[in-house]
Image: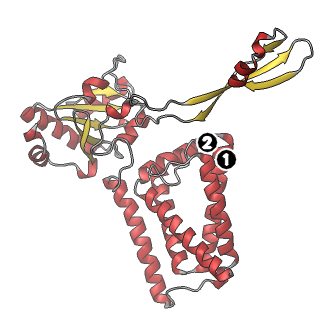
Amino acid sequence: MNRITLIISRVIVGLLFIFSGLIKANDPLGFGYKLQEYFEVFHTTFLNDYAPAIAILLCTLEIVLGALLILGIWANKVAWGLLMLILFFTFLTFYSAFFEVVTSCGCFGDAIPLTPWQSFSKDLILLALIIVIFRQREDIVPLITNSRLQDFSAGFILFLSLGFGLYTYNFQPILDFLPYKIGNNIPALMIIPPGAPQDVYEITYSLKNKKSGEEKKMTDKVYVKTQIWKDNNWEIVGDPVNRLIKKGYDLKIKDLKITDSQGTDYNKEILENPYYNLIVVAYDLTKANRKGMGDLNALAINAAENFNVRTVLLTSNSAQSAANFSSDNKLVMEIFYADGIPLKSMVRSNPGLLLLKNGIVINKWHFHNLPSFDELSSAYLQNN
């Protein structure tokens, strides 16, 4: 029975660690943004610049530990590594849930969003399974017994895991789970469909009896049903408390507002352009890759001269900072402004490029794999 329990625990933990690591390694920059939220909470923001590197290493560690656990290689070291890692993750998810400091842990990236309490529950289950593995680590029989082959297998898994994270960091996620993925209609995702369910809230009142001093709490439904409001001896004290009891329709894009330097709304004009238009996204110009900006500027010049295609730059920098950057780099793009959070979701690159038409994301590129003007024109612009 103990042997079967150990095998089941190894398979479940191993597969979950591999899956979790791969999902996050698919979007290491996004995982890095999540790590920065934790750095903010624990006052370690000096690590912000290293967040992508830490994200890639953590993802690699998860994949490697999961794979080695299933193969039974280096069982003692792997069991210790899993135990230390799950204790760390369990502490983080409990802290996030109890103190409500990070709304989503990012355990499975944007593919499977979990609330902090869901994440904590998941980690408790994993902790129980890992304790089983740790206590029986000496009973784990490796599937590969040759020591050289074990070393080769571990090295190969490490190479693939690390290589995958580095590739997606430099060339965009393989699978895009964000609302700005290719094929999505951005304006449509900013509108609640007719008849969509709304959020349902429950209001709780605190009441006090003027004569007896008795205090009680009741919901708005009970308040109306009992008609206690007709009794002048009862009065509401303090402010009513609103509590969400049923989540309604989840708007996919709710925080994107594009403005000019004066605050004028340009969402409709830019996002609903019926022709091809290029959107350069650089959420932080001070950290934007200069060569990438130069390549994008060249594309913008050629697109305007040959096809009269409009190119705009979206950034979260101040108007003065953006103007200085534009002047220093001789940019030909119109500059507009938006919050950094949606800009980071548009494209996992700083800078990055989106090709839009009628609000639909036709394609998107990291600055490392930008198309040449000939490729862009032959594939898209000639058919504008």
Badge 2 crowding class, 10 Å Cα cut-off, few under 14, some 14 to 19, many 20 or more, is some
Q: CA distance from mark 1 to mark 2?
A: 10 Å
- Left or right: 194 with respect to 358? right
- Left or right: 40 with respect to 341? right
The kind of residue tagged 1 is Tyr
The kind of residue tagged 2 is Val
In front: 220, or 150? 220
Please give the name of the residue rendered at 39% of the width and 40% of the height, measured from the top-left corner.
344
- Left or right: 92 with respect to 210? left
How far across and down, in percent of the image, does residue 153 sit? Answer: 44, 80
How far across and down, in percent of the image, does residue 113 sit? Answer: 50, 48
Please give the name of the residue rendered at 27% of the width and 51% of the height, measured from the top-left corner.
368
Q: Which residue is label 1 attached to?
A: 95
Q: Which residue is label 2 attached to?
A: 41
Q: Report the colour scheme.
A: secondary structure
Where, by quadrant of the figure, is residue 297 drawn?
Answer: top left
What quarter of the picture does the C terminus occupy?
A: top left
